[in-house]
């Protein structure tokens, strides 16, 4: 029985070590010209909230920490990033038409009001991502203002 436990533990250890050689591609881009925080006039509090709570999963540039290099954590994080970018990629903000921007803004507003974004596990690991009531209010005010601007633009 003891020999079986030792063999199993050794096999698990070897499997863990081998998985470290299979890391997902990093979500890192040098281009930031289409990024929402660089293309919109945002109050500094809103810009900081986007940087701390949104851009790791909803842009083409994630800030990786030490635990992002450990499989299978790296795979789970990569899946979150892939799903987040599929829902909304803030690195492509300037390429969206006004209708898509308005829709994205309304979706953001709903997620913030419901408290579903940023994700709880993300906030647990990134305390700076927690949105207090004042910050939530500032983001929602910016969203409302930006939506109004987009809806009331003269047609070309």
Image (cartoon, helix red, strand yellow):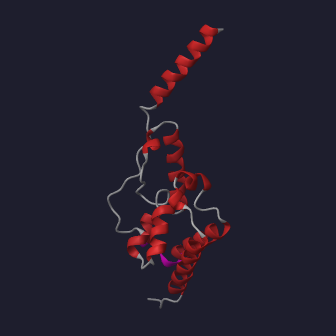
69 versus 91 height, above or below = above
Q: Which residues are magenta?
A: 94-99
Say which residue appears at 42% left-offset and 49% top-offset. Answer: 64
Say which residue appears at 67% left-offset and 67% top-offset. Answer: 114
Say which residue appears at 45% left-offset and 64% top-offset. Answer: 51
- Residue 8: x %, y % from top left: 58, 16
Q: Quadrant of the C terminus?
A: bottom left
Residue sitting farthest toward the bottom = 154
The residue closer to the viewer here, 113 or 82, is 113
Residue 2, quarter of picture: top right
Residue 95 is covered by the magenta coloring: yes
Residue 151, quarter of picture: bottom right
- Residue 86: x %, y % from top left: 53, 58
Q: Quadrant of the N terminus?
A: top right
127 versus 46 height, above or below = above
- Residue 141: x %, y % from top left: 56, 80
75 versus 98 height, above or below = above
Say which residue appears at 40% left-offset and 68% top-offset. Answer: 35
The residue closer to the viewer here, 34 or 4, is 4
């Amino acid at each position: 029985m003891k020999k079986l436990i030792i063999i199993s533990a050794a096999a698990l250890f070897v499997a863990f070590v081998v998985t470290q050689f299979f890391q997902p591609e990093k979500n890192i881009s040098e281009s930031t010209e289409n990024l929402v925080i660089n293309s919109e006039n945002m109050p500094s509090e809103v810009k900081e909230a986007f940087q701390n709570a949104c851009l790791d999963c909803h842009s083409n540039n994630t800030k990786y920490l030490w635990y992002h290099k450990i499989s299978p954590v790296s795979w789970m994080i990569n899946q979150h990033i892939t799903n987040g970018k599929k829902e909304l990629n803030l690195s492509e903000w300037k390429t969206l038409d006004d209708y898509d921007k308005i829709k994205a803004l309304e979706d953001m507003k709903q997620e913030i009001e419901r408290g579903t974004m940023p994700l709880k596990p993300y906030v647990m690991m990134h305390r700076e991502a927690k949105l207090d009531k004042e910050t939530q209010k500032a983001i929602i005010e910016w969203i409302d203002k930006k939506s109004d601007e987009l809806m009331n633009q003269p047609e070309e």
